[in-house]
Amino acid sequence: MFGTELLERRSKPERIADQAWQHLVSAVSSAGDSVRDTARSARRSGSGLADDAGDLVGSAAEEARRRAVLAFDSLAGRRPALPWALLIGAALVGAAVGWAAGSAARAAGGRDADDIEFVDVDRPDSPVGLDG
C-alpha cells in the first residue's frame, strides 16, 4: 500500500518521466538483444571474412616492415642491394632475343639468288606497255 500511495502522490511530470524511463529501458534492452543476435549471426557468417582480413593485415604488416627496414637503411646511409635476380633474368631474356634475331637473319641472308625463282606472267588483258 505504501508504494501505491507514493506513486499517486507524485506529480504528473514525475510520472511522465518515470514512464519515459521505463520505455527507454525497454527499448535499450530490446536493442541490446537484437544487437547481440546480429553479432552472433555476423560472427558465424563473418569468420571467412575475418580470416581474409587477417591475411590482408598480415601482408600489410609485412609490407610496412619491409618499407621500415628500407627507410632505416636509407637514413643510415646504406645503399639498397642490387636486384641480382632481376638483372640476370633480363640478361637471359636479352640473350634469347638476340639469338633468335641472329638465327632469323642468318636464315634470311643465307639464301642464294639462284634459289629464288622468278615467274614471268604474260597477261593478255593488260594495258599496252606494261608487258615488257
Image (cartoon, rainbow, N blue to C red):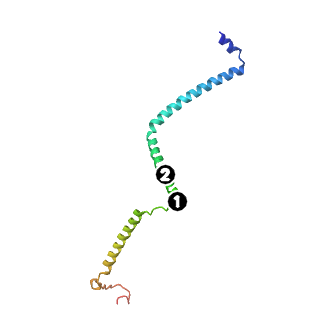
Q: Is 127 in front, or is 17?
A: 17
> Where 40 falls versus 74 (above or below)?
above
Secondary-structure class at tag 1: helix
Q: Residue furthest left?
A: 115
Q: Secondary structure at mark 2?
A: helix
Q: Please report the residue visible at 34 percent of the width from the left and 76 percent of the height from the top.
A: 102
Image coordinates of residue 126 in percent, x first then y, are 36, 85
Residue drawn at x 37%, y 88% is 130
Give the amino acid at mark 2.
Answer: Arg
Single out the mark in the foreground, 2 or 1.
Answer: 1
Task: Report whether 58 appears left or right of 2.
Answer: left
The kind of residue tagged 1 is Ser
Outermost residue, top direction?
1
Q: Is residue 43 left or right of residue 124?
A: right
Look at mark 2 in the image and give the residue it sits on: 65
**Circle 1 residue:** 74
